[in-house]
Amino acid sequence: MAERRTGAVIEDQLLSPTLLRFRVEAEPGQQFPAYVAGQHIPLGRDDCKLTRKAGTASDGKPVCEPEFDPWGRQTVGPLKQYYSMASSPAETAEHGWLEFLVAIDHGYHGLPGRLYEDLYHAGESVKCGVSYYESVGGNFTLEARTREADSVLMIGTGTGVAPFVSMLKELHAQDTSLKSGCRYTLLQTGRTVPELAYRELLSEIEGAGRFDFLYLPTISRPSSDDPTDKQIGRGRANNVVRHIYGLPTAEEEKATGATSEVTRAAANLALDRLVNPILPSHVSVASLVPRLDPKSTVLLACGNPAFLADIKASTKRCQLRFETEAGA
Ligand SMILES: Cc1cc2nc3c(=O)[nH]c(=O)nc-3n(C[C@H](O)[C@H](O)[C@H](O)COP(=O)(O)OP(=O)(O)OC[C@H]3O[C@@H](n4cnc5c(N)ncnc54)[C@H](O)[C@@H]3O)c2cc1C
C-alpha cells in the first residue's frame, strides 16, 4: 500500500471566485515521489465534514446533505481526492514543492466540496497540513499519448489546464527529444479572464520560443468588465475546435436538427446565448489548418465532461486522434 505522508500547504492564491492555486511541501525529511508531467497524486485531510447524497436535481447534479452521528453532530472523517500536478518535474526537483490548481466547488445543490472546504478554511493560515500518498499515477503524459504525432493540440477548460501547464513548463525547462520537430498548441478556455489561470506564464513560454508552441486563450462568458485584449479569443472550447475544423457550433447544429416545437424552442434559446467562437487576433483559421492537420495531430483534452463529449464527437468527424484523462 502507498505510504501516507503529511505535507503542508505553503502558499495559496485565489485566482478567481472559482479557482485556487496552491503549493504543497513534502513531509519534513522526505521528497515527493518522482512524477511525469500530466500525472496526478492523491491528497487528503482527516477532518472533512462528511456528507451523503440525498438525491439528484433536475440538471443531473447531486443534492447533498450533511451526515450526522447518533448525537446529531455532523460526521467528520478522512477524505482523499486526486489532483493533477500543475508544477513540472523540473520545478519540483528545484524547489521541492508540488503545485495544484483546484476548482472551488461552492455546491450547486446543497453543500460545498468536502476536501476543498476543509483545505481552504485551513489553508487560510499558510502551513496547514495536508496528507499525500506516495502513489503518483496516470498515463495522461506526452510519452504515452502523443507518440508518432507531429502536432499536439491540448485543450484545457477550467482546472483541466493543470496537466498541460505541467507539460509545457517541462518542455520549456528540458531539452527533451519530445519537443524536437513537434508543434504544440494549447487552447485554454475559462469563463472569464481571471479564470485563464497561468495565462501570463503561458504567454511567456510562447514568447521565449524554446520550442514550437502556440497559445490560444479564449473566454466563454465575456462581459463589459473584461479588459479588451485582442490576444484573448471568445467561445467555448468545443465551439472553438468546431470553428478550426470548419464545423458549425454545437448550438447551431442543435437548432438545425430540432424536430419538435419543444426542442426547437430550447435550441433557439441556446442559440440566443451563444458566444460565437473568435480566435485570438494574431491567429487565423487559415494559419491553423496546416498546423493542426488531422493526419498528423493528436488532440489531448482535459476539463468539463460535457464539452469533452462534444469535442470527442468533432474529432471523430474530422478523423483526428482524441485522448483524454479519464475521470479528471
Ligand atoms: C485523475 C484526476 C485528476 C483530477 N485533477 C483535478 C485538478 O487538478 N483540480 C481539481 O480541482 N480537481 C481535480 N480532480 C477532481 C478532484 O479529485 C475532486 O473530485 C474535486 O476537487 C472535488 O473534491 P471535494 O472533496 O472538494 O468535493 P466533493 O465533496 O467530492 O464534492 C464534489 C461535488 O459533489 C457534491 N457532493 C458532496 N458530497 C457528496 C456525496 N457524498 N455524494 C455525492 N456528491 C457529493 C458536492 O455538492 C459537489 O458539487 C481530479 C480528479 C481525478 C480523478
Image (cartoon, grey):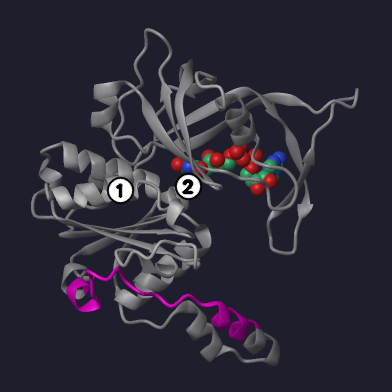
Instruction: Tell which of 94 and 39 is nearer to you.
Output: 94
Mark 1: few, some, or many residues within 10 Å (few <14, many ≥20)?
Answer: few
Q: Callout 2, which amino acid?
A: Ala
User: Distance from label 2 to label 1 (Cα)?
Assistant: 24 Å
Q: Residue 160 appears at what percent x and percent y?
A: 43, 50
Question: Disc 2 beta carbon < 8 A from ligand 1?
Answer: yes
Query: Which residues fall within the magenta stretch?
Result: 266-288
Q: Secondary structure at mark 1?
A: helix
Instruction: Answer yes or no: is residue 149 visible.
Output: yes
Residue 245 in the image: above or below residue 17 = below
Asked whether 109 falls inside the magenta stretch, the response is no
The furthest residue to the right? 71
Label 2: which residue?
Answer: 328
Residue at 41%, 9% in the rendered image: 28
Asked whether 276 falls inside the magenta stretch, the response is yes
Residue at 58%, 79% in the rendered image: 270
Label 1: which residue?
Answer: 200
On the rendered structure, is 145 left or right of 224?
Answer: left
The furthest residue to the top? 29
Figure label count: 2
User: Could you say which disc has been placed on residue 18 in the image?
Assistant: none
Q: Residue 217 appears at what percent x and percent y?
A: 34, 60
Instruction: Answer yes or no: is residue 1 visible.
Output: no
On the rendered structure, is 163 left or right of 192?
Answer: left
